[in-house]
């Protein structure tokens, strides 16, 4: 994302979603008026559910973190409603819109709901939201990895040609980070396997991998009021019809993120399976 100007920061952060690798879902980067609900603020204050290769604070190490004074500036801006326009040198108030006619960003606001629905899901005119019946404009793609999400995010993984620009997009907007050519199988919400670029499936899916490939061992998918079965160290309880089922070999568990694997294991994203970390194998 482009953070070189105030306008580009506003366009990239306010009521826009980022991927929380710890939770495996899209979350709002900046929720106007709510610093603690803003993913950006959690990252600059290292308030993350997990760290390391899965998710990193901002700026990422080895760069030095922001000073307490710099963090307070960001906090104050968000608490003030994340206004799009401020006069140069004007102090950011502790709450409310800035003086001098600044505009607070409120369109489509709100934090994501418990079922993973993305923030800013309101207006028909939101160029960065889409549904199955309302595709994204231009070369953006529609993406959501949770079948319960009804409104998806248009993400910028396909670049526009150098000699073309969609007039419906904001002036100067250019998608970037093209998808890799490699493809893989995904289990669709209808239970049918489809093939898409690794990072850019263009509609929600149940999980990475073919529909009959491996087991769901993600404890967050259990909705039954029951305790997990006791499994051997190299096994994990499977999830069937949203309830705990029998123990299965941990190497047969599908994954996209480390927290979907047993404690002490990690997700091998080349085969989308749980594996024992190399350091543990050598012990």
Image: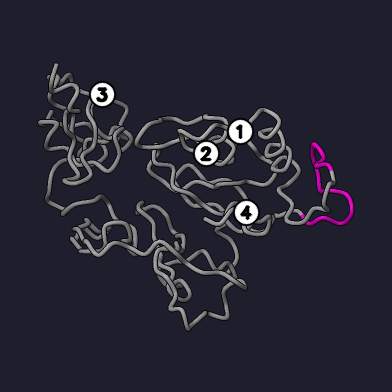
State which region is magenta.
91-103
| Disc with the residue nearer the chain's start (4 vs 1) | 4
Task: Say which quarter of the image contains residue 222.
Answer: top left
Which image quarter is the C terminus in?
top left
Q: In this image, 226 relative to 108: left or right?
A: left
SS for tag 2? loop
* Rendered position, 95 above or below 106: above
Asked whether disc 3 touches disc 2, contact meaning CB atoms under 8 Å apart, the reply is no
Residue underneath mark 2: 59
Q: Residue furthest bottom?
A: 163
Q: Position of residue 128 (x, y in %)?
A: 52, 64
* Rendered position, 68 above or below 43: above
Residue underneath mark 1: 66
Residue 145 sits inside the magenta stretch: no
Q: Which mark is on residue 9?
A: 4
Residue depicted at 46% across the width and 76% down the height: 138
| Disc with the residue nearer the chain's start (4 vs 3) | 4
């Amino acid at each position: 994302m482009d953070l070189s100007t105030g306008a580009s920061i506003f366009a990239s952060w306010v009521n826009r979603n980022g991927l929380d690798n710890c939770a495996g879902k899209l979350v709002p980067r900046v929720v106007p008026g709510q610093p603690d609900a803003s993913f950006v603020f959690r990252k600059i204050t290292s308030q993350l559910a997990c760290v390391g290769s899965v998710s990193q604070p901002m700026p990422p190490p080895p760069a030095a973190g922001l000073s307490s004074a710099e963090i307070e500036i960001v906090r104050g801006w968000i608490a003030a409603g994340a206004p799009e326009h401020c006069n140069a040198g004007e102090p950011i108030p502790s709450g409310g819109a800035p003086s001098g006619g600044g505009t607070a960003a409120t369109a489509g606001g709100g934090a994501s709901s418990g079922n993973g629905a993305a923030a800013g899901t309101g207006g028909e005119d939101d160029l960065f939201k889409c549904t199955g019946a309302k595709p994204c404009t231009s070369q953006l793609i529609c993406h959501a990895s949770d079948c319960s999400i009804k409104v998806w995010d248009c993400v910028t993984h396909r670049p526009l040609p150098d000699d073309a620009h969609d007039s419906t997009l904001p002036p100067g907007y250019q998608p970037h980070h093209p998808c890799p050519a490699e493809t893989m199988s995904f289990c669709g919400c209808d239970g049918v396997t489809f093939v898409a670029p690794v990072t850019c499936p263009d509609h929600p899916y149940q999980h990475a991998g073919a529909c009959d490939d491996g087991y769901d061992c993600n404890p967050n998918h259990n909705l039954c009021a029951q305790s997990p079965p006791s499994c051997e160290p190299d096994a994990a309880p499977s999830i069937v019809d949203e309830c705990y089922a029998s123990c299965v070999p941990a190497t047969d568990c599908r994954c996209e993120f480390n927290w979907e694997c047993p404690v002490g294991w990690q997700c091998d994203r080349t085969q989308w399976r749980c594996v024992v970390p190399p350091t543990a194998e050598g012990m």
